Every structure is written in structure tokens, then in C-alpha cells.
Amino acid sequence: MSADDTGARLFVGLQYLLPQHLLSGVVHWLARLELSWVKNAFIDNFLVNYRPDMSEAEEPDPRRYASFNAFFTRALRPGARPVDPSPTVLVSPVDGTVSQIGRIDGAALVQAKGLSYTLESLLDEAAPAWAAALRGGAFATLYLAPHNYHRIHMPLAGALKAAWYVPGQLFSVNATTASQVPGLFARNERVVCVFADAALSFALVLVGALFVGSMSTVWHGEVTPRSPRVRGELPLEFVRAALSLEKGAEMGRFNMGSTVILLLPPGKAEWLAELGAGSAIRVGQPLARLI
């Protein structure tokens, strides 16, 4: 076994032992402190280690953000992410990297080489109707690294038809962990949002991860951290935003890096041929064409 393999096994093994939610809760608290010396220390360290492109930010001066979380979830300047306007094009909801992309084999989605998980386990066994509607469809697993822009946008125009929270663990979702933890995306905490559009229905699954202390939507505000951590429907009434959003509109955001899984029903869209595992993506660029 190589040193790299040994290191990877130790990295993943340690995650089984860590108090994942406690650590993520500490990060959640620290990231929101507005003490200048605290937030500036975190921001400066992040700039050195991850080198985000601040020229794209609506506020390019890192020191002007009130907290590390405000810096991390910063808005982009207008026009930084043009959205393909074609009604037959489905666009990327995030900046990041394609982890896996392809067809759902019955109910099976590829996680990594030699590993798969089921649609039912991802969406939660309590949502059989939505799982049935998406069986045999298509999926794209999109990974957001720490340096990426961390707001999530609509791949198509659509109206929110259902949303729910599924409790779970908080393993890292990087490539190393995805290659070694069975059913990773169905084990981690997640928020599922299902939409309907004139052209098709689709789902976005926001997957939590280690140190991801918060997932939020424009309708419900901060969904996680959550207490108690039990499955729950997210309401469609008395929400903070209109249920119908245009293509490219913001629908949610992460604190720290994580993953979004885009699910499409069968026979409705084809992924662009040039996309594959490892492809870099940006909000608004074409991912698929409707058929």
C-alpha cells in the first residue's frame, strides 16, 4: 500500500471518530463572530491558502465583510456569471467541479469508481413518489471546493413544489472520502428541493459536509444547523421568497464547501458531451439540452 493510500485511509477513518456535528457547530459559531481580529484572521488565512478571485465579488475588499461567513458567502458583481438565456438549455446551479455525471441506472447513482447508492436513500425513504418520478433519469454531482463561490442558483425556471430536511452525518465530500465511504451522499445531512417547470420537473439536493455549519434556502432561511435533527418537511406557505424563480436566480447557499446533486426525470434532457468527471463548471454555463 502506498503512502498516499495510507494517508487517505487515515483521513477517512478519522472522520468516523470525530464528533462531526459538534465540530461543525463550533465552525458555525466562529464563522459568524464580528470581532475584527477574529474574522480578519480567518479571512487572511483563507486568502493565503485558497486564493479566491475577489475581483468577481460585489465587495472586493475582504476586510469590509462583517464576519468570515459574510465573506465566504459573498455575492458576485452583476454580470460576473452570465446565464445562458436559451429556453432549451439547462445551466449549472453552482461554481465547482463535476464529480460524477450520467444516467440513473434504474434507481442507482454512481458515487465513485466501484461505489453507488440509490435514489430512494438519497431523497429519503419517506419520499417514494418523487423517487419514482426520477428513476431512470439523469444526475450530476457537483462539488464545491472552499475557494468556489458558494451560492446556489436555479438551473431552470421553476416553482418549488416540495422541500424537506433529512438528518445525517457530516463526512467530508471531497474525492478521497467519496471513494471510500459507501453511500456517502445518502449518509450525510441534506436538504432536498423539488421543482416543476413547464418543460420538466427536477430536484436539487444540497448535501452537508464536515464543517458545513449551515445550509439555507431563500424560502426558509437557515435550515441547518437544526435541533432536533429529525426529518422534517419545509413549509411552502409563509416563506421568505416567491415559490417561482427564474433561471439563474439564487435559491440557497452553503457555509464552507459541499455538494449539490441535480436530478432530472427520464427522457427530458441530455448532458453536454464535453462534460465529465473533473470538468470545471460555473453558474449559468450550459450543462444539458432539453429534448
Image (cartoon, rainbow, N blue to C red):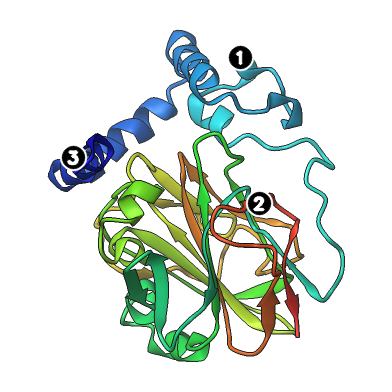
Give the residue drawn at x 60%, y 57%.
240
> Element type at marker 3?
helix
Residue 194 shows in this picture: no
Q: Nearer the viewer, mark 2 or mark 1?
A: 2
Q: In the displayed structure, would residue 49 be above or below residue 37?
A: below
Tell me the kind of residue under disc 2: Ile
Residue highlighted by disc 1: 63
Mark 1 nearby-residue class (10 Å; few <14, some 14–19, many ≥20): some
Q: Position of residue 287 (x, y in %)?
A: 70, 65
Residue 163 shows in this picture: yes
Q: What distance separates the C-alpha of mark 1 from that of mark 3?
A: 36 Å
Q: Position of residue 278 (x, y in %)?
A: 55, 52
Give the residue drawn at x 42%, y 75%.
109
Point out the image quarter for the C terminus. bottom right
Give the residue drawn at x 54%, y 59%.
277
Q: Nearer the viewer, mark 1 or mark 3?
A: 3
Would you say 138 lies left or right of 83 here? left
Residue highlighted by disc 3: 10
* Observer-nearest of 16 and 21: 16
Q: Quadrant of residue 119?
A: bottom left
Tell me the kind of residue under disc 3: Leu
Tell me the kind of residue under disc 1: Arg
Q: In the displayed structure, would residue 65 be above or below residue 93?
A: above
* Observer-nearest of 106 and 228: 106
Residue highlighted by disc 2: 281
